[in-house]
Image (cartoon, grey):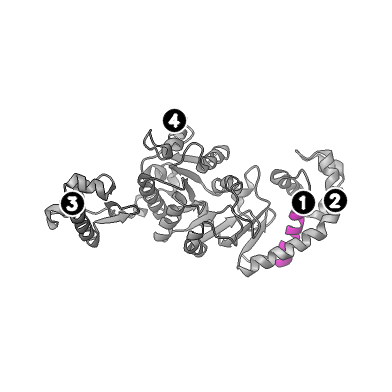
């Protein structure tokens, strides 16, 4: 998508001028530009005509006509500086008036007047699902996030998330491992990588999807930004999946936006005594979200995108006869869950040193894999 420089600058001048006027937020700017697609048309109208737009009072209309001409010069300088910054990092900028502005954003109550992007959006990204959750998942949450992201991405759904630690990071990485597209919507400037440890992931997403934000270049990742960006994670997605979050967690903001935006909302249940599962359990209990226990539940519900042949099952039969008696004990202990090394030693009645030796052997054979924190599970 090549943007004509003059066109985007004129659009930016218009939108940035509106943003400088007191009383004009995203929803009112949307209504104004739907009526007047250039500032010349806006300025040629009377304050009575402008005030006839829902939500625009006569005071705001008068303020627009009075202050707008003086704001244009300042906005032009801002727009030119912004274009230079975006060009340096080979990014893109679009306004709500631009042809390359995401259609799904226009459908919400308060679409971002301006977005910044690295990478590309494709038509195929309309078939997408957001996977979000806590920054500090349990082993259960980590494993389930990987399973869902793997099978949903194999079914050709673009995985959308927020590039945060935890569930977001697992979802993005799993999509990339499965050669699928993934999109991150961030709460800071497009030129800022947050969290810093996701630098490599950030660049991989740009090559295999897109990074999108509504925040100007240089904007720091302030806490206020993240709840706001969550409405865009939901807006861009066809459906939203919640995996592990407390009732007060950020992922619940995304769930609430999904409900308001009438998106399909799914939630993975968890232990009733786990605070990390209190959010999904609440959504299910209140019938706000559909309970899902496996990716197939989502794929069947989305129907048009569901196809068994798209799913590559990595599960394999383990020939236990090829294993020694100690390896067999370990495999049996791990058949239904991931376990910490201490728990494996307890279940198999082996010394931890012996356990580690046999686990290493099983890992070389591709039968088990090690997870963070000295947990182990069957390789599927």
Numbered disc 1: secondary structure: loop
In the rendered structure, the answer to whether residue 328 lies left or right of residue 168 reads left
Between the C-alphas of marks 2 and 3, the distance is 77 Å
Numbered disc 3: secondary structure: loop
Q: Main secondary structure of the magenta part?
A: helix
Disc 1, disc 4: CB below 8 Å?
no
Please name which of the two marks, 3 or 1, marks the residue nearer to the observer. Answer: 3
Please name which of the two marks, 2 or 3, marks the residue nearer to the observer. Answer: 3
Residue corresponding to mark 4:
285
Q: Residue furthest bottom?
A: 88
Of the residues under marks 4 and 3, which one precedes in the sequence? 4
Residue corresponding to mark 3:
351
Between the C-alphas of marks 2 and 4, the distance is 51 Å
Q: Quadrant of the N terminus?
A: bottom right
Of the residues under marks 1 and 4, which one precedes in the sequence? 1
Work out whether residue 334 can be spotted.
no
Residue corresponding to mark 1:
20
Residue 67 circle label: 2
Q: Nearer the viewer, residue 70 or 293?
A: 70
Of the residues under marks 2 and 1, which one precedes in the sequence? 1
In the rendered structure, the answer to whether residue 205 lies left or right of residue 84 reads left
Q: Which residues are magenta?
A: 4-19
> Where is residue 109 drawn, in percent x and y?
65, 42
Between the C-alphas of marks 2 and 1, the distance is 9 Å
In the rendered structure, the answer to whether residue 197 lies left or right of residue 319 reads right
């Amino acid at each position: 998508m090549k943007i004509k420089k003059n066109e985007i600058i004129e659009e930016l001048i218009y939108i940035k001028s509106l943003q400088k006027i007191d009383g004009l937020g995203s929803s009112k700017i949307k209504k104004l530009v739907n009526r007047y697609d250039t500032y010349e048309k806006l300025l040629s109208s009377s304050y009575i005509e402008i005030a006839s737009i829902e939500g625009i009072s006569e005071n705001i209309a008068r303020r627009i006509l009075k202050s707008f001409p003086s704001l244009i010069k300042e906005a032009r300088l801002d727009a030119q500086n912004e274009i230079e910054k975006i060009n340096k990092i080979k990014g893109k900028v679009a306004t709500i008036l631009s042809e390359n502005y995401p259609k799904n954003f226009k459908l919400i109550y308060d679409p971002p007047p301006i977005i910044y992007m690295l990478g590309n959006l494709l038509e195929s990204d309309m078939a997408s699902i957001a996977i979000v959750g806590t920054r500090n998942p349990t082993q259960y949450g980590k494993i389930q996030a990987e399973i869902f992201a793997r099978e949903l991405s194999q079914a050709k759904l673009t995985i959308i998330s927020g590039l945060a630690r935890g569930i977001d990071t697992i979802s993005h990485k799993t999509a990339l491992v499965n050669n699928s597209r993934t999109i991150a919507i961030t709460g800071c400037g497009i030129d800022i990588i947050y969290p810093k440890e996701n630098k490599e992931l950030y660049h991989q997403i740009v090559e295999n999807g897109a990074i999108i934000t509504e925040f100007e270049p240089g904007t720091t990742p302030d806490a206020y930004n993240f709840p706001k960006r969550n409405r865009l994670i939901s807006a861009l997605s066809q459906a939203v999946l919640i995996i592990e979050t407390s009732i007060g967690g950020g992922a619940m903001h995304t769930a609430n936006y999904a409900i308001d935006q009438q998106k399909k909302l799914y939630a993975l249940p968890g232990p009733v005594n786990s605070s990390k599962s209190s959010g999904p359990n609440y959504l299910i209990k209140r019938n706000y979200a559909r309970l899902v226990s496996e990716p197939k539940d989502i794929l069947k519900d989305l129907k048009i995108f569901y196809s068994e042949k798209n799913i590559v099952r990595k599960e394999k039969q383990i020939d236990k006869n090829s294993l020694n008696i100690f390896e067999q004990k370990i495999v049996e202990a791990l058949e239904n869950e991931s376990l910490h090394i201490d728990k494996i030693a307890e279940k198999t009645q082996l010394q931890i040193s012996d356990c580690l030796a046999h686990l290493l052997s099983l890992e070389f054979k591709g039968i088990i894999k090690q997870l963070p924190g000295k947990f182990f599970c069957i390789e599927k």
